[in-house]
Amino acid sequence: MISDIMIFLFWIIVAVALVAIASRLAHRSYRRFLKKSRGPESTALPFAEPATPLDALLGPLEQRHPGKTGLTLLLDNADAFSARAQSATHAGRSLDLMYYIWSTDLAGWLLIDALVAAADRGVRIRLLLDDVNVQGFDRTFLALTQHPLIEVRLFNPTRNRGQALRRLAEMLLGLARFTRRMHGKMWIADGRLAIIGGRNVGDTYFSADNGTRNSVDADVMFVGPKVAEVSDVFDSYWNLGLSLPIVALWPAFRASPRAFRNRLARHIRSAASREFIAKVQNGRSPDSFLIDRLYWTDKVQLLADPPDKAYDLHTAPWMGTAIDSILQAAEFDVQLITPYFVPGSAGLAVLTGLMTRGVKVSLVTNALSATDLITVYGAYRYFRSPMLAAGASVFEFSKPALAGHKHDFVHSKVFMIDGRQGIVGSLNFDLRSAYINTELGLLFEGPPLLAELRAMFDTLSSPEQAYRVTQIGRSLRWSVVRGGQPSIMTVEPEAGWSKRAVSWMVGHLPIQEYL
């Protein structure tokens, strides 16, 4: 019996050693591949004559507000799409774009069309996408990058494309590397205008398809001196050795430009596309929309993870650390909107410490019935009770869905401190955003902007759109305002037993850092 156990342990040790050796060899091979495949460095284009339409539109405004940044919140999904589409239409020099997800759906194709149209006018386009969501859509972006003025790069890509088993083996052998993703979102037009926030590119984020669930999201569009800082951040990611030209992953690929243009035309001429564009254009003047709502202030700070966070390096402070410091300086009120709340022991200590000294902390996150990631909700369960015990106000968003539709879900990443400072960006209040993904956000002050964010919080936390969660002893209570539902429930409302079971099990597993 003892000898059988010893033999079993021996083979376990051998297997672990072989996996470790294979992982080491795979890592060395990938590093050689990176050095061989990285593209040439490039940087943001400087302002130059002749002036572009955006130069003519925004230059005089910047001159009237020297040293200040003009900001507009994009809280409406149609406004967020319009801002991107119209800035692309007005661009005459460059478009630098960074996204975690770019779906090839209605909204995705419409914005691809805007990029192609801009490139046809002579605009240089650099599109940086995180690789984890590109797999399966390579041919679209490979065809796009064949335009002489468009280059597509993928962040931290896998070498094996279109081969599921080999790709799976590569991921498993390089799991520590593969889990590190570029989660920031960035849209820069002519170095004049920038949009950052929580939205990816896809129907979900712009309410482009009535058949899909929609996200409640937040971006900030801004012009002025801070745009140059954002451009520098983009350059640092673009030139990082982990950002590879997509053509380096498919060296033998060739696409017919005519076939791609025909495919593009079919998408943008569809009835659904025309209907969505009509909705977006309704009441939005192309020029005035970009400038009429700007609030000018010098109280603006860019918050950005250094790109080598993907190597687990701390060459500059990480965004999560900066936000912790900002939160700790709160005097009386903190309001958080986050789709995923997994603060870890350190984040929980920051928030409970605030409440201990009398700061009111309020949280809006997704209910189990609305979340798109049940596993993350399971991890959130672990921290919900300590937050409630410390005195937090917790609201779980679950807006009633129309018949035949799925629940909308919160995707906004918003922090408000003392009603005076706001942060809008890509960072979720979870451990993955804090320690694994790279993130981006903007810290700002301005009464009109904070009033908009407070109104958003009040709407999302209202009884019509959210459950108020309270705790009596160790028992949780959900306050529900729904026809046909009890006014007080002791389990997650409108969520079946299977969802509750999965979330309960995940909440007891030591995997919170990876969710």
Image (cartoon, rainbow, N blue to C red):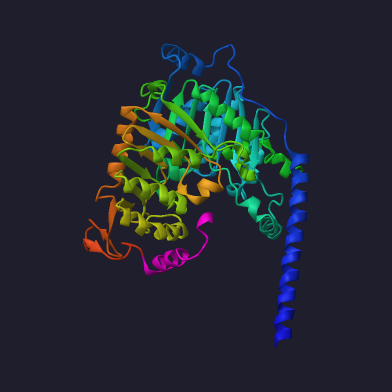
Q: Main secondary structure of the magenta part?
A: helix
**In the image as oriented, which residue stretches furthest toward the bottom?**
1
Residue 18 position by quadrant: bottom right
Q: Residue at x 71, y 85 (%)?
A: 2
Residue 33 position by quadrant: top right
Rendering coords of residue 430 (x, y %): 47, 50
Residue 254 visible:
no
Instruction: Report the front residue among 65 and 331.
Output: 331
Above or below, 4 relative to 411:
below
Residue 21 position by quadrant: bottom right
Residue 29 visible:
yes
Above or below, 359 relative to 7:
above
**Seen in the image, is 148 located left or right of residue 422?**
right
**Seen in the image, is 121 located left or right of residue 37?**
left
Which residues fall within the magenta stretch? 496-515
**Seen in the image, is 170 located left or right of residue 197?**
right
Image quarter hosting the N terminus: bottom right
Q: Residue at x 61, y 24 (%)?
A: 44
Residue 514 forms part of the magenta stretch: yes
Instruction: Report the front residue among 321 and 412.
Output: 321
Residue 164 forms part of the magenta stretch: no
Rendering coords of residue 314 (x, y %): 60, 40
Q: Residue at x 41, y 65 (%)?
A: 499
Instruction: Report the front residue among 15 and 154.
Output: 15
Q: Residue at x 71, y 58 (%)?
A: 166
